[in-house]
Image (cartoon, rainbow, N blue to C red):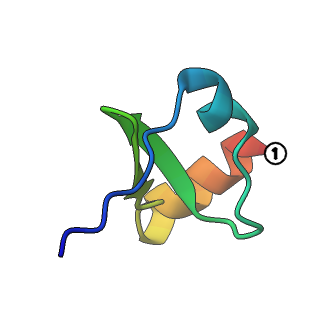
Amino acid sequence: MTITTPKLTFEEYLAYDDGTDTRYELVNGELIPISLGSGQHGEQVLTADN
């Protein structure tokens, strides 16, 4: 049995919020988690977002 998840539109992606700090990119309608990086790079990304 194959389970398929519905594809998101770009508008749905922009409105999506799973209640976590996880960031996603939209690839062919699917959400792909993005790493924030580590160490100094991760800190700079978080600072630039605020």
Q: Compare residues 3 and 49 and report the one nearer the observer.
A: 3
In the displayed structure, 18 sits above or below 49; it is below
* Amino acid type assigned to the residue bearing label 1 in the image: Asn
- Location of the N terminus by quadrant is bottom left
Q: Is mark 1 on a helix, strand or loop?
A: loop
User: Which residue is under mark 1?
Assistant: 50
In the displayed structure, 42 sits above or below 45; it is below
Q: Position of residue 26 (x, y in %)?
A: 42, 37
Rendering quarter of residue 39? bottom left
Q: Position of residue 10 (x, y in %)?
A: 56, 23
Q: Residue at x 42, y 69 (%)?
A: 38
Q: Which residue lies furthest to the left in this view?
A: 1
- Location of the C terminus by quadrant is top right
Left or right of 7? Residue 18 is right
Q: Which residue lies furthest to the front in this view?
A: 1
Count of marks, rendered view: 1
How many residues crowd mark 1 within 10 Å: few (<14), some (14–19), many (20+)?
few
In the displayed structure, 35 sits above or below 38; it is above
Q: Residue at x 53, y 27 (%)?
A: 9
Q: Which residue lies furthest to the right in this view?
A: 50
Q: Position of residue 28 (x, y in %)?
A: 30, 32
Q: Compare residues 1 and 12 and report the one nearer the observer.
A: 1
Q: Residue at x 75, y 37 (%)?
A: 15
Q: Which residue is drawn at 51% across and 37% down?
A: 8
Left or right of 50? Residue 45 is left
In the displayed structure, 1 sits above or below 49; it is below
